[in-house]
C-alpha cells in the first residue's frame, strides 16, 4: 500500500509542479493591480455601469498603458499633509498608484468602487480643478447607481463608514447641481 501511494505521488508530482506561481496568479485577473480581496470585489461591481471606464483605466487603458496598483495605506506615511485624505492617486516612475486610506478598509465594496472611479481619473502628476470636479461628479453618479443596485447602502451613514458619509455628501452636491458637472471634460 505504501508503495502504491509513493508511486502515485511520484507519477502525479510533475503535473502538480507544472503550475507555477505565475500561472496561478495569472488566473486572478487583478494580480497586477491588487492583492486586496475587497478591492477586487469593488472592481467587479463596476461591470455594467459607467464605472467600467474606470475599471478599464485601472486594468491598463490609461496614459501609462500599465495597470494601476491599488492598496490600502496609512496616507500619513507618504506625508502628514495626506493623513486625512480619503484616497490618493499617485504617479511615480511612469507607474500609477491608487492609495485608499486605511481607515476605509471596512467600507462597503460599493463605496470603494465609487472612490476608485474618482481616483482612476488622475493619470498624471497634475490635478486641475476641472479634473477634481469631474472626479467628484463621477464618484457621486456611481454612488447613486450603487445605491439603486444595493438598497441596503441607503441605511449606512458617516457614523457607520466615513467613506459612505463622503459619498452621501457628494451625492447631495451632485443632485443640487442638477446632475451636471461644473466643467465639461475635454
Image: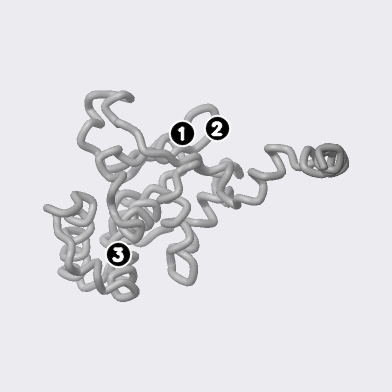
Taking the image as shown, residue 25 lies to the left or right of residue 16, namely left
Numbered label attached to residue 91: 1
Image spot of residue 79 (x, y percent): 28, 24
Q: Is residue 157 above or below residue 27?
A: below
Question: Which residue shows up at 68% across the image and 37% down it?
Answer: 21
Return the residue at label 3.
143
Image spot of residue 115 (x, y percent): 33, 52
Direction left: furthest residue: 159
Mark in front: 2 vs 3:
3
Mark in front: 1 vs 3:
3
Quadrant position of the C terminus in the picture: bottom left
For the residues labelled 2 and 3, the Cα–Cα distance comes to 30 Å
Q: Is residue 157 above or below residue 122?
A: below
N-terminal of the pair, mark 2 or mark 3, is 2
The answer to which image quadrant residue 165 occupies is bottom left
For the residues labelled 2 and 1, the Cα–Cα distance comes to 6 Å
Image spot of residue 59 (x, y percent): 56, 50
- Count residues near mark 1 (Cα–Cα under 10 Å), then give few for <14, some for 14-19, many for 20+: some
- Count residues near mark 2 (Cα–Cα under 10 Å), then give few for <14, some for 14-19, many for 20+: few
Give the camera-side residue of 153 and 129: 153
Local SS, label 1: strand
Return the residue at label 2.
94
For the residues labelled 1 and 3, the Cα–Cα distance comes to 26 Å
Q: Is residue 63 above or below residue 166?
A: above
Local SS, label 2: loop
Question: Which residue shows up at 39% across the image and 55% down it?
Answer: 117
Taking the image as shown, residue 179 lies to the left or right of residue 71, namely left
Residue contact between numbered discs 1 and 3, judged by CB atoms under 8 Å: no
Give the camera-side residue of 123 and 117: 117
Quadrant position of the N terminus in the picture: top right
Amino acid at each position: 500500500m505504501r508503495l502504491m501511494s509513493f508511486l502515485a505521488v511520484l507519477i502525479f508530482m510533475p503535473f502538480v509542479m507544472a503550475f507555477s506561481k505565475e500561472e496561478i496568479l495569472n488566473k486572478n485577473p487583478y494580480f497586477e493591480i491588487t492583492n486586496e480581496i475587497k478591492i477586487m470585489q469593488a472592481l467587479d461591481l463596476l461591470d455594467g455601469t459607467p464605472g467600467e471606464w474606470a475599471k478599464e483605466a485601472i486594468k491598463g487603458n490609461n496614459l501609462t498603458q500599465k495597470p494601476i496598483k491599488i492598496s490600502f495605506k496609512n496616507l500619513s506615511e507618504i506625508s502628514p499633509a495626506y493623513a486625512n485624505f480619503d484616497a490618493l492617486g499617485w504617479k511615480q516612475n511612469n507607474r500609477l498608484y491608487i492609495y485608499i486610506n486605511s481607515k476605509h478598509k471596512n467600507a462597503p465594496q460599493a463605496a470603494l468602487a465609487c472612490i476608485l472611479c474618482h481616483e482612476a481619473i488622475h493619470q498624471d502628476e497634475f490635478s486641475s480643478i476641472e479634473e477634481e470636479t469631474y472626479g467628484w461628479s463621477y464618484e457621486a453618479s456611481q454612488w447613486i447607481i450603487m445605491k439603486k443596485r444595493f438598497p441596503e447602502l441607503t441605511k449606512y451613514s458617516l457614523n457607520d463608514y466615513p467613506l459612505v458619509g463622503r459619498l452621501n455628501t457628494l451625492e447631495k452636491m451632485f443632485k443640487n447641481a442638477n446632475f451636471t458637472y461644473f466643467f465639461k471634460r475635454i
